[in-house]
Structure formats: C-alpha cells, structure tokens
Image: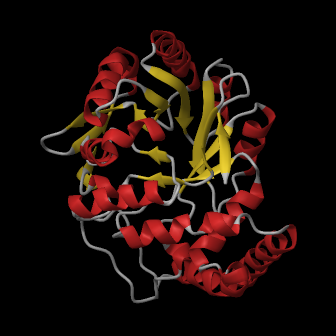
Amino acid sequence: MKRRLGRANNPIEVSALGMGCWAIGGPWSILRDEGPTPAGWGDVDDAESIRAVQAALDAGITFFDTAANYGCGHSERILGKALGDRRKDVVIATKFGHVIDEETRIMRGDDDAIVANLRRDCENSLRRLNTDVIDLYQLHAANLDPGKAVPVRELLEELVVEGKIRAYGWSTDHVDRAEVFVEGESCASIQFSLNLFNDNSEIVSLCEANDLACVNKKPLASGILTGKFTVDSTFPENDMRRAIDFKDPQWAGTLKMVDGLRDALTSGGRTLAQGALAWIWARSDRTIPIPGARSEKQVRENAGAMAHGPLTSAEFEEANRIVAEIREELAGEAD
C-alpha cells in the first residue's frame, strides 16, 4: 500500500503506514510551571529500538516520523543510526519549534524564538539524523498564534529552495492554524490525531480540499486500541500515560468501547490494532497513520495491517455505529 505525501506538484511517495518514533526517544520531560513533567513513554532499549526500525524497513515501511523533542534529540540519533546506508530508501519526517536540552532531556516552549532558532534547529536535526536533507519538516508548536505562523511558513519555503528540506507541514489539531500552512506552496501535510475515538473531521476535510496528506498520530489511541489494557493496567512514573486510571468511569468506558469493537475490527483475520489502522485508511485515502513502536513484535504487527488494506465500507460503518451506540449508552449511565 502506498500514499502520496504532498501535493501533486511535489509528490513524495511513501508507504501507507509509517512508524512513529516518539517511544524510541526514551524518557524526557516538558518544563511546566510546576516543574519538569514526563513526556516520553518510559524506558527503552536502544538496541531493540534499532532492530524495530530495521524490522519496519524489512516489512515495507518507508515513512518514519520523529521530532527533536522526542528524548531531546535521542530519537533522531537512534533513527539515523538504525537507517544507516538505507537512508536513501525512506522518507524522514521530523519536527521543530521548541527549545531542547540534550543533556538534561528537558524541553520548554518559546513561541517567540521559533523563527530565530529555526535554521539552527534544522541543522541540529540534520546532524542527529545523519542526513543531508529532511523530507518533511513539521512545526511542532501546536498552539502557535496563526499570525506568528506566517513568518515560520515563509522561512520554511526558503529552506526548501536551499535544499535543506523537501517539504513541510504543521503538527496541530487546530484548523485555524493548519489553514495558515495550507497556503504555502511546499506544504505537504498536516499531522493530527485520528482514531476511532477522535474523528477530527474538519482537518480531514481541509487536507482533502487542499491536496494534502493527513499524517495521523495516536492512531491506536496511545495503545488503548491494541486491546492489551484492562482496568488494572498502570504505567511507570516516567511514562506520559502515568495519570490514566482505567478504573475511572471515563477510561473504563473507553475500554468498554474497545471490547465492543473487537469482533468488527478483527474480521478477515486482522488483530485489533490492525483493524484500528484499517479504519483510518477507510476514513480517507489521504491518511497515513504513524503508530508508535519500540519492539520488532509491535512493528511486525502494525506492518501486517497493510496486507489486509482498509476496512470495507460496511465494516467501517459498523465500527462507527458501535462507537456511537456505546457512547450513547455511557452518556445515559452518567446521567
């Protein structure tokens, strides 16, 4: 399965499934008012991460999405090392827009410094990724004021002309932000959350109307749509999901939806995770889900979804019906 990243006048062909490299960054933190807050997915084994990236390559995945944030440079370095001399066979997407400290692994936001830091951030990512060009460079400041995004877009266009990047996009779930980048000639995509619990229809429509790819983060709802969690599941303190309490009615309701979807999504021999990815492909032919993975086993399961392809129209509608029905039931219980 293939997808086109970018507009018809600047097409970049990629596999319909990407590998999200947030998890392989290991532990890192965001500096907030109350102090550093964990933003990674817990401890990682770098050797296993490298094997996971190489397993993805062997399984036909050609699109890898990372960010300077992830491990404050660590994910980019691991990805660059894992790709090695196979760099020419893949498309690399990374992100910028925050201030990172590679030694402390603490990131902080500074919207007023994005333009001033952009060229240096680009050079640092090129170095860590061990590459001469970034295929897709994405703004990572999701809430940046739309007015401040215009000079960012203009500078990104300069980087395209200079050959530092091939195309750019914005990782944001805000339509008014995405609309600013849509106007750029070399804008290729918008990255946003999309899964069975979060349809994000406005941004899907925006991408379809403007010939852009939908790069979809959290396609498995942070792992919940794999079906591996129960009401007793917990997370380590250095995992960004540590605050999730599956005994809470809201989260328990999410697990109930997963159970309700199991039969519909596993039709045709798919696993639950593969069915959730197939739903995204059925949602729009612009979608490129990027499930995170940090082991060969996870990568192989995700990649196996491509052999099945998207859900049929009937399967897609049935999955939507189940989610709507259970949501209505849960709302009635809450009343």
Write down the quadrant of residue 206 in the picture.
top right
Q: Looking at the image, which residue is at 24% across and 46% down?
A: 74
Q: Which x, y percent locates residue 184? A: 64, 19
| Nearer to me, 130 or 105 | 130
Q: Looking at the image, which residue is at 76% across and 60% down?
A: 282
Q: Looking at the image, which residue is at 78% across and 80% down?
A: 325
| Nearer to me, 193 or 91 | 91
- Identify the colour scheme used: secondary structure
Left or right of 248? Residue 187 is right
Q: Is residue 9 above or below residue 78?
A: above
Residue 108 appears in the rendering: yes
Q: Is residue 318 above or below residue 169?
A: below
| Nearer to me, 284 or 146 | 284
Write down the quadrant of residue 65 in the picture.
top left
Q: Which x, y percent locates residue 85? A: 33, 39
Write down the quadrant of residue 45 in the picture.
bottom left
Q: Looking at the image, which residue is at 40% across and 73% down?
A: 297
Which quadrant would the N terminus be assigned to in this image? bottom right
Which quadrant would the C terminus be assigned to in this image? bottom right
Q: Which x, y percent locates residue 314? A: 87, 73
Q: Which x, y percent locates residue 39? A: 32, 55
Q: Is residue 112 above or below residue 332?
A: above
| Nearer to me, 297 or 208 | 297
Residue 72 appears in the rendering: no
Left or right of 286? Residue 236 is left
- Residue situated furthest right in the rendering: 314
